[in-house]
Image (cartoon, rainbow, N blue to C red):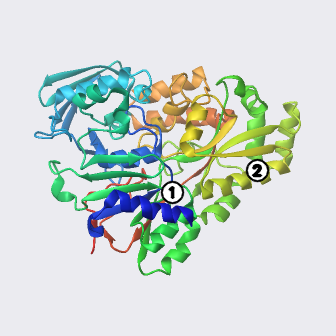
Amino acid sequence: MKLLASVALGLAIALGATASAQTLRIGLQEDPDTLDGAKNWSFVGRVVMQSICDKLVDIAPDQSIVPMLATAWETAEDGKSITMKLRPGVKFHDGEPVNAAAVKFSLDRALTLPDSRRRSEISAVTNVAAVDDLTVRIELATPFSPLFAQFADRAGIIVSPKAVQALGDQFGSKPVCAGPYKFVERVVQDRIVLEKFADYWDKDSYYVQRVVFLPIPDTTVRFANLQSGQLELVERLAANDIPTLKKNKNLAYTGITGMGYTGLTFNIANGPRADNPFGRDKRVRQALDLAIDRNIINEVVYSGEYTVGNQPVPPTNPNYNKALPLGGRDLARAKALLREAGVTNPTLNLLVPNTDDSRRAAEMIQSMARDAGIEVKLLLVEFITMLQQAKEGKFDADFVGWSGRIDTDANIHTLLACKVPGNDGHYCNAKLDELLDAGRRSSNGAERKKIYEGVMQTLVEEKPILYLWHAKWLWGLSAKLEGFTPYPDGIIRLRGVKLKS
């Protein structure tokens, strides 16, 4: 296996004489894009940054908000300002203090950078004020329910102002934050190396001295490296590898149902490539939906571990619309919709990440679509290349997952609201935007549920994204690894993780 050999070579270069018991090697499904929290758009980037960059708050395994850099907070009665108290004595990796000025700098940067991916996520913020060295007041245009969910993700990452000013556009290649591990080096498509930060505020809870992330897109090769002892942890273990894993006393696995989705995102209005039957007419998208049997794909590709669905949140989410159940495959209706749309044998060029599971699932979609008279051409590309092509409008549709957030808004607004940076297909629906804005303003659970009923109705009808299933996060582990806790956002957290010698 060529990749197996390259992993071993990369590790030899990266680790040198470091004792293996002190080094944790993690296999990633893709190579991240930038490691700048304001600009990052890849899931694996979030995985890596979790170890480098502390956020204002984090989530617990039960999805509740817990303190991180902020230890306490209070919301004004009108819901239009939040005062946060910061943890004292915290340092960035460059020795600079984490204070209110740094928080203001980081949030202002996320709101104003031309290529910020976070702006829409915290767009209700109108001003960030450093009240004193350890107190920040965040002022809002309107009450904004999803704010803390966003602060538990990349929008809440606090960066060193000194490092940003020194590195400029190169900050994402050499990030300087305040997490438990500091950045050492990155070789694109090969490895990212981190080492423990001696001055971390919670350093006694971190036992691993060195962390090496290795992008290995091929699921089979990633699992082979785990089996051979070249890796101690792999993310997105293939479900059909579990029976083999169970026979190996040196391995273990764990899993948890995620909060996001996998689906087909269509180019509705992003440049000339949107001028195709799927971009022009929702009936063609509906026809493709009716041609797909999600349950069969789940059984064949994911060993039945995933949860099929037709909405951006799983059925366990309180805002899932139970009045919109997933129907079965209906080829007759699919063909009728194509006739109504005046389309014969439409062709969809589908971007697909070059990972084993994605390719197999896409091939099954291709075969099923053909039965309805729809030709799906699969274009296998490296994941980050796919994201860039979609952003630039160089796609008809892409096969992509969203890892999910604890607030329903972040599974939808970031990706489908009019003119937000993450809306690669440029879908724009004024009625949907009104509903999403109302959901953001409300903090009443029953009221939000009613609002999201309308949101889900619109999405199921319009299908700017054809939602397919909700993944179960699966991790393969070396038996030497202790203390690993699965989180429903799929992010690897190394607090309490140990390696037995």
Instruction: Count residues near mark 2 (Cα–Cα under 10 Å), then give few for <14, some for 14-19, many for 20+.
Output: many
The reply to whether residue 75 is in sight is no
Q: What residue type is labelled 1?
A: Ile
First along the sequence among labels 1 and 2: 1
Which residue shows up at 57% across the image and 42% down it? 321
Compared across the picture, whether 99 is left or right of 125 comes to: left
* Circle 2: element type: helix
> Residue 218: x percent and y percent?
57, 59
Which residue shows up at 23% across the image and 41% down it? 178
Label of residue 366 in the image: 2
* Circle 1: element type: loop
> Residue 333: x percent and y percent?
83, 44
Compared across the picture, whether 304 is left or right of 235 comes to: right
> Residue 250: x percent and y percent?
41, 78
> Residue 171: x percent and y percent?
34, 33
Q: What residue type is labelled 2?
A: Gln
Residue that label 1 marks: 216
Label of residue 275 in the image: none
